[in-house]
Structure formats: structure tokens, C-alpha cells
Amino acid sequence: MADAALLKEVNIKTGIVKRLVKELACYKKEAEKEESKLKSMKADPKADEYLVKKQAEVLQDTRQMIPNCTQRVVKALEDLKKVSFLELPS
């Protein structure tokens, strides 16, 4: 019974880690996309200054999420390690 509960918890924690790693990859990819969009907007002499400023804010918001997401990945990995190395009483 305890083995099934432990296995379930390990599966849940593993799923959390997988989801957070995917989320981190998406934020990094989005930051690259937003950065290239901002560069092209800045290169365009007809670009509206307000839109360029807003695009810079979008890029900044995306970049701010990366360290937060990285911390959540690290915490989820630590939680998974704690659960996977948990010793069950005999």
C-alpha cells in the first residue's frame, strides 16, 4: 500500500518537473521571438514609438519570468529528490 502511494507521489512530482521544464523552454523561446520582433521594430523607421516601447515592456516581462520559472524547476527537482530517496518504514 505504501509503495503504491510512494509511486503515485513520485509520478506526480515527475509530472510537475516535466511541466515546469516545458514552461521554462517556452519562456526562453518566447523571449527570443519577442527580442527579434523588437529589433525589427526598432530597425523600421516608420514604427510607432509607443508600440516599440510596449514591445520592449513585453520582452522585459517575459525575461522576468525566466528566473522565477528556473527557481520553481529547482524547487520541484528538490521535492522529487526528497520523495524518491524517502525511506519507507519496514
Image: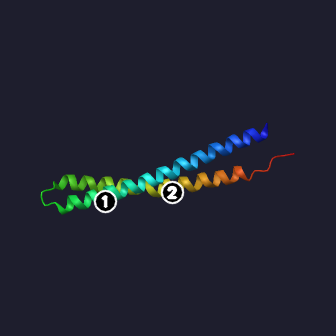
Please give the label number shown on residue 87: none
Rendering colour mode: rainbow
Q: Secondary structure at mark 1?
A: helix
Q: Residue at x 55, y 54 (%)?
A: 73
In the image, 27: left or right of 58? right
In the image, 23: left or right of 6? left
Q: Nearer the viewer, residue 19 or 63?
A: 19
Amino acid type at circle 2 is Thr
Q: x and y percent of residue 43 in the render? A: 19, 63
Q: Residue at x 17, y 56 (%)?
A: 49
Quarter of the image with the C terminus is top right
In the image, 4: left or right of 68? right
Question: Of label 2 and label 1, which has the lower sequence position?
Answer: 1
Quarter of the image with the N terminus is top right
Q: x and y percent of residue 38 in the render? A: 26, 58
Q: x and y percent of residue 76 in the render? A: 59, 51
Crowding at mark 1 (Cα within 10 Å: few <14, some 14-19, many 20+): some
Circles 2 and 1: CB atoms closer than 8 Å: no
Please give the label number shown on residue 70: 2
Q: x and y percent of residue 58 in the render? A: 32, 52
The CA span between labels 2 and 1 is 20 Å
Please give the label number shown on residue 35: 1
Name the residue at the right extreme.
90
Crowding at mark 2 (Cα within 10 Å: few <14, some 14-19, many 20+): some
Amino acid type at circle 1 is Glu
Q: Comparing marks 2 and 1, which lies closer to the viewer?
A: 1
Number of numbered tags placed on the structure image:
2
Name the residue at the left extreme.
46
Q: Secondary structure at mark 2?
A: helix
